[in-house]
Image (cartoon, rainbow, N blue to C red):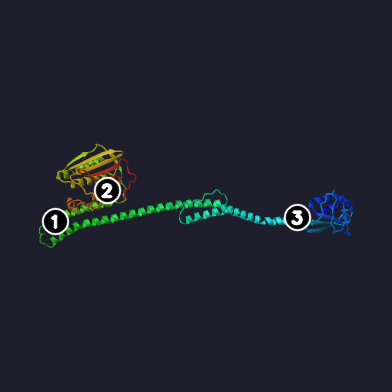
Amino acid sequence: MHLAEQMTDFDNIDDCKNELVDFSAKTNATFWIEDSNGYIIYPNEMSMETSTVSADQTVTFDEDESFVDMQSSGATTTNFYPITLKNSTAYTLAVQTDLFVVQQATKVLLSILPYVILMIFVLSLLCSWLYTRYITRPIVRLSRISKQMAELNFSGQCNTTREDELGCLTQNLNSLSASLSTALNDLQTANQQLKIDIEKEQALEQQRVDFFSAASHELKTPLTILKGHLAGMLNGVSGYENHTEYMERSFAVVERMEKLVKEVLYVSKVDGTKKCEYKTVDISEIFRVQIATVTDLLEKKKQSLEANIPDRLYCEAEQVQMERAIQNILVNAIRYSPSGELIHISLFEMNDMIRGEIENTGVHISGDAIPHLFDAFYRADTSRNRNTGGTGLGLYIVRKIMEMHHAKYGISNTNKGVLFWFELSCKQPIDNSIQNP
C-alpha cells in the first residue's frame, strides 16, 4: 500500500522503477503490474528471458536485475492493489507472497513452545518467590508478632528498613509492643507492690488482733483475782475475814493492772502516726540518767554495775522515746539476773554509728526463745517471769522505739550472760514518722 501511494507521484511505470526494485529487495515478494485489461505490463518483455507471461505464469527476472526469483517454494498468497499514476492511468499492483518462511517460523515456534512454557513457569516461580520474600514474608512475620502480643508476650520485634506501608506498620507495631510491655511491667510492679502492701497490712492487722487478744488475756487474770477477793469479802466467805490483808492484795493487783494499761496505751501511741521530734541529744547523758534511776533496784538485788560511757556522744534522736527504751533494757537486765551478778554497759562510736551494749551475767536464754523476745507478752519462762512484776511489753516497746529510729538491734547469749546491743546512726533518720513494724 505504501508502494501504491508512492507510484501516484509518477507519470509512467518506468519512472518508478527504482521504487519497484527497492520494494522487491525489501519484501522478498513476487509482484507484477497489470493494466486495466489484465495484461502484465511490468516486468516487460525487454527485461525477461522468457516471452510475455500471463497472470498465472511464472515470472523470472533477468540476472542483472535485483528482483527475486518468482519461483514459489510452497503455498502462496496473492493480493491486488489498485493504483493510479499522475497522468490518471489506472493499473493494478499484484503482490504474491511465499508462505514458506511463515511455515518455517511456525514450525520453529512450535518446536520451542515447550521450552518457552518451561521458562515461563520457572520465571513465574521466581517472581512468586520474590513476591513472597518482599510482600508475604513481612506480613507473616507481623502476624506472628501480633499473635505473641495477643498472648502478652512483647519480646518479639520486627526488624525492617522498608519505607513503604509495611515498613510503617512494622514501626507502629514495634512502638505498640514497647509501650504495652512498659505498661504491663509497670502494672505488674504496681500489682506486686500492692500485694506486698496488702500482705503487710494483713500482717499488721493480725499483729494488732494478737496484741489485743494477749492484752485481754493479761487483764483477765488480775480482774479474776480482784473479783474473787471482793466477792469473798462481801459474802463473808471463810478465810476472807481479814479485810485489810485482802484489800492490800487487791490494791497490788490494781497497781499491776494500772501498769499494764499504761503499757498498752504507750504501745498504742507508738503504733500511731504521730511524728517524732528528732533533735540532737547527748546519748551519754541519757545513759547516766537512766543508770541513776535503777540504783535502788541494783542495791535491792545486790548487783554491781560497770559503765564504759564517754563524756559526750551526740546523735539525732527522740529523747523521751530513747530514755524509755534504755530504761526498759536496764530494768530487764537487772530483773532477770540472779543476785550478786554484774551489769556491764558500753557506749562508743564507730563508722558514723553509735553502738550501745548492755550485758547482764549469770543467765542465758534458750536459742528457740531469742527470736520471740521482742514479741508482745512473750515470756521465755512463764512461771519465773510472773514473779518479776513485768507486763511482757518491755522488750516489745524497745523494739518499737528502735524501729522508730531505724536502728539495728538484737539480743544474743555470751560466755558470761546475755547481751543486748543496738546501733544508731549519728544522722537524723530520713523518715520522721513512727512506722509500724
Q: Picture quarter containing residue 72?
A: bottom right
Q: Which residue is mark 1?
A: 247
- CA gap between label 1 and label 2 equals 36 Å
Residue at the spot 28% in from the left edge and 51% down from the top edge: 269
Q: Which residue is mark 3?
A: 101
Q: Which residue is mark 2?
A: 399
The secondary element bearing badge 2 is classed as helix
On screen, 305 above or below 239?
A: above
Instruction: Count neighbours of disc 3 (C-alpha within 10 A) and say few if under 14, some if 14 to 19, many if 20 or more.
Output: few
Q: Picture quarter containing residue 308?
A: top left
Q: Amino acid at mark 2?
A: Arg
Residue at the spot 17% in from the left edge and 58% down from the top edge: 225
Measured as percent of width and height from the top left, residue 353 is found at 30, 40
> Which one is in front, 57 or 14?
57
**Residue 232: which numbered mark, if any?**
none
First of labels 3, 2 by sequence position: 3
